[in-house]
Amino acid sequence: MSNPGRGSLTSDPGRGSLTSDPGRDIIYIVTWLSQSLNHPSRRARGFTPWELTRGLSKLAVNDSNKKKIIEANALQEFSKMLSFNDARELENTTECLWTLCFDKSAGQVIKDFPGLVTALDSLKNSDNEKIRKNAKGALWLINEEKEASKVSDNVGEDVGKHIFISYSWAEKTKVKEIYKSLKVS
């Protein structure tokens, strides 16, 4: 970042990058996050952990930034943040983890990182809707392959005959005819 003082963490939220070198910026943000978590005022360069994780979450939308965030050791800081009881920090941290999980290799690193899945698992029952949604989303992506294999193991088993037909009201008569012919079959 050219201006190391207080300012905006994302200059173009649609693109999710700060400057021509987002890798360097991500390293700065993760460093500041670590410093803020270890400082009595919970601030670094004027930023709180909540603001810094919000910036990382926005940057994580860009696929090329996901790997950079993990390589900058953000997971270690996220692990620390998940043990605090600050709702805004938990919302942003779980959102960032969920966003990172959309990349399969990042999801695997998160899955293998000590304590993260356990923390997400406990947060999936949070009273806070955002935290709960983010934790469940991250866990769903992390466990997707395991769930997919369970489904594929059941393929071929007789689980009953169910058909779901989506249609517009204009096609209602035609769909009823199709339904009747399928029911007879």
Image (cartoon, rainbow, N blue to C red):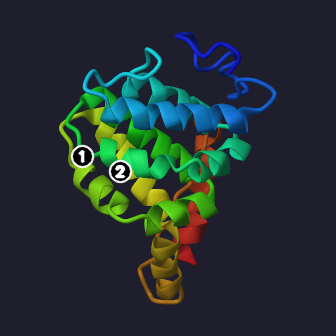
* 73 shown above or below 81: below
Residue with the mark numbered 2: 79
Residues 36 and 75: in front is 36
- Which numbered tag is attached to residue 129? none
Residues 73 and 87: in front is 73
The answer to whether 1 appears left or right of 7 in the picture is right
The CA distance from mark 2 to mark 1 is 7 Å
Residue with the mark numbered 1: 83
Figure quadrant of residue 108 = bottom right
At numbered mark 2, what does the secondary structure look like: helix, strand or loop? helix
Give x and y (percent) for residue 57.
53, 34
The answer to whether 53 appears left or right of 182 in the picture is left
Q: Residue at x 43, y 19 (%)?
A: 47
Asked if disc 2 and disc 1 are in contact, CB closer than 8 Å, the reply is yes
Q: Amino acid at mark 1?
A: Ser
Q: Residue at x 36, y 22 (%)?
A: 43
Q: Please rate how many residues cluster around mark 1, counting C-alpha atoms within 10 Å: few if below 14, some from 14 to 19, many from 20.
A: few
At numbered mark 1, what does the secondary structure look like: helix, strand or loop? loop
* 13 shown above or below 164: above
Q: Amino acid at mark 2?
A: Ser
Q: For the view shown, which residue lies furthest in the right direction?
A: 20
Q: Please rate how many residues cluster around mark 2, counting C-alpha atoms within 10 Å: few if below 14, some from 14 to 19, many from 20.
A: some
Whether residue 153 is visible here, answered yes or no, is yes
Q: Quadrant of the N terminus?
A: top right
Give x and y (percent) for residue 7.
56, 10
Give x and y (percent) for residue 78.
40, 45
Whether residue 166 is visible here, answered yes or no, is no
Q: Quadrant of the C terminus?
A: bottom right
